[in-house]
Image (cartoon, rainbow, N blue to C red):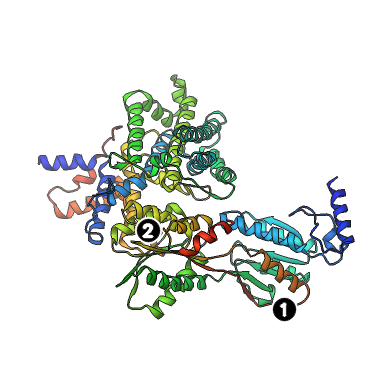
Amino acid sequence: MTTTTRWRALTRHNLFWPVAVLVALLLVNIPFTPDFFAIHMTDGHLYGSLVSIVLFGSPLILVAVGMTLVIATGGIDLSVGAVVAITGALTCSYISDQKDQDALAGVLLAMGLGLLAAVVCGLWNGFLVARMGIQPIIATLIIMVAGRGVAQLITDGQIITINSEPYKLIGGGYWLTLPFSIFVVAAVVAVTVALTRRTALGLLVESVGGNAEASRLVGIRSMRIKIMVYVFCALCAGIAGLMISSNTSAADGNNAGLWIELDAILAVVIGGTSLLGGRFSIGGTVVGALVIQTLTTTIYTIGVPTQTNLVFKAAVVIVVCLLQSPKFRAKVFGARAKTTAPATPAAAPAEPAPKMEVS
Amino acid sequence: MLNRRNFLTAAIGVAAAGTLAACAKEDDSSSDSAGSGGGKKITLGFSQVGSESGWRTANSESVKSAAKEAGYTLKFSDAQQKQENQISAIRNYIAQKVDVIAFSPVVVTGWDAVLKEAKAAKIPVVLTDRSVETSDDSLYVTLVGSDFTDEGRRAAKILEKVIEKAGLKGNVKIAQLEGTTGAAPAIERAKGFKEVMDAEHKDDWKIVVSQTGDFTRAGGKQVMAAFLQSNPDINVLFAHNDDMAIGAIQSIEAAGKKPGKDILIVSIDGVKDGFVAMSEGKINAIVECNPLLGPQLMEVVKTVHDGGTVERWIKTKEGDFMQDQAKAALPTRKY
């Protein structure tokens, strides 16, 4: 009895289904790649599929964490992909102009410039959404479309290749045998969780997402909160932009971060954050982003034919979303519970959906 | 002011019998009325796809400089990846009564109407780089561009040489990095490669994994990382473009293997960064896909304008490069 209640409590936890899907996806790889979970030491750093998943998934996790807060205020940010491209383009073109590309000061300055550009994009988005009252989807569409043009302008339509050891660290380098990007992601996630869960900030964000006008009337500066989340989101996208360009040591204005906004929104949704705003889960988003990256890697390793890549991806996403829906689960699993255990009819579906706590 | 200068240049041009390339600014809609006053000077209207890659930029530069050298008046427009821009550019050229229209179609279909207008105005149309599908073959004169299938075949042929040179014994296990799914270069390069492989190496060559890397470095790097996990015994990589190969090289190095030695690499395109990687010994061979088709295009334009006949498909002059040629060829790479 206690085990069933514990099991029930576990399945009711808002991270249960995303984590279950992640584990299932990882297990799918075993028959195709028997040593999928193996991690070896190669050239002084750890090497294996799991390491690759985290390494290539880092930019997505960052963008998705920023996106989570924007979505929690009831908004959406479509411009993150373009911000990724702008940051990478600006940073790489600055570094490529340096005489000594390995000079740490120059690289730091370049990264500062890139991030500054990202913050400016975020301020612009926040200004349009909060001050001008433009629908977030329209306001951020402006930079989504124009930003890629700006990135191409910076790179002159070319791919800028750089050769800078210090810059390579942030997205493609290793530290303490692990990819350095893992530490960056961990730091950003830790800071975000601390700021939103250890201070009132998270509550304020959710309150603005629940009802911006009511929040304003009780004395929350909802405009300021909104501008802040767009700036934070753009900053996360900027760091992701540094990682992506550093990982390949090149800035590609056309393709860097292309469609990453859609993957980020998907990660947020898989993580259990409502698109209506007012509630969010950073942990869920991180798991969601890992699910998407694992799915991508799985497609490559199990040899899905190229033409069916997207169909395969879509099928998995549909399953994940259905599993996330309490109504669907009640219908499918509830019905099965009825047939297997007729003694307790309709026990599962009749119970009211539990109130999810903000976590 | 500018008009007067153009007029002066035009006048000088007439005085010099139009032979000297003293023409006005490039891609300028110059006011010397489509060459009718300037005697034999040919006016060419060119509509480019956009400027999406280094390859494309080099292609545009080649057309501009070749037109200048040939002494033609070039009206150049950039369609920014949109068919409607391209159609309106072509209509403009028809209205301006240019002598020849050339364009690189954004997409394959939907050109019949505007090409019929050009035909009615008796302006010959030359396609560059990419082809179109039309109901009526007489709507365009010729295509100047690469044969992607042949590039795939050449890649397989050069791989034979690479394998022989590296002394690779036993089975050849190939990983293929495909271009964007559905794009003509991706489909045809894969087809050409497979054709040669099936015909001559049915038993000893095998493509063990094949996946799209979207023609990008990031894509090539990520896909190759997964390939190396699922098939650690890969010994050859065939990439549909240099950028994917460059990305894959980084993954191969991260796996502790030597690109160009442990895994032999053949790619297509011949961009500058590809040649840099080849001169470092990381790519074994590159099959060129030449964007510098300007001079060939100008020859065709002249022939067509003079009423001569040309072949339906004029293939770009392209070369294959092995590692020992990389260092010598590197300085000549313009893109």
Task: Look at label 1 and name its amino acid.
Answer: Thr
Quadrant in the rendering for residue B124: bottom right
Which of the image's four quarters has the C terminus of chain B?
bottom right
Task: Look at label 2 and name its amino acid.
Answer: Pro
Which residue ends up furthest to the left in the rendered image?
A1
Q: CA distance from mark 1 to mark 2?
A: 48 Å
Left or right: A173 as drawn, with respect to B288 = left
Q: Nearer the viewer, mark 1 or mark 2?
A: 2
Chain designation of label 2: B
Residue B58: x and y in percent read 61, 57
Look at 40% across and 55% down and name the residue there. Answer: B249
Q: Which residue is mark 2?
A: B259
Chain designation of label 1: B
Residue A329: x and y in percent read 27, 49
Q: Is residue A74 visible?
A: no
Crowding at mark 2 (Cα within 10 Å: few <14, some 14-19, many 20+): many
- Of the pair A52 and B119, the residue shown nearer to us: A52
Above or below, comparing residue A205 to residue B100 in the picture: above
Residue A331: x and y in percent read 27, 51
Badge 1 element: loop
Which residue ends up furthest to the top in the rendered image?
A219
Q: Which mark is residue B309?
A: 1
Badge 2 element: loop
Q: Is residue B166 visible?
A: yes
Above or below, comparing residue A231 to residue B199 in the picture: above
Residue B132: x and y in percent read 61, 69
Quadrant in the rendering for residue B30: bottom right
Specify whether disc 1 shares its chain with disc 2: yes
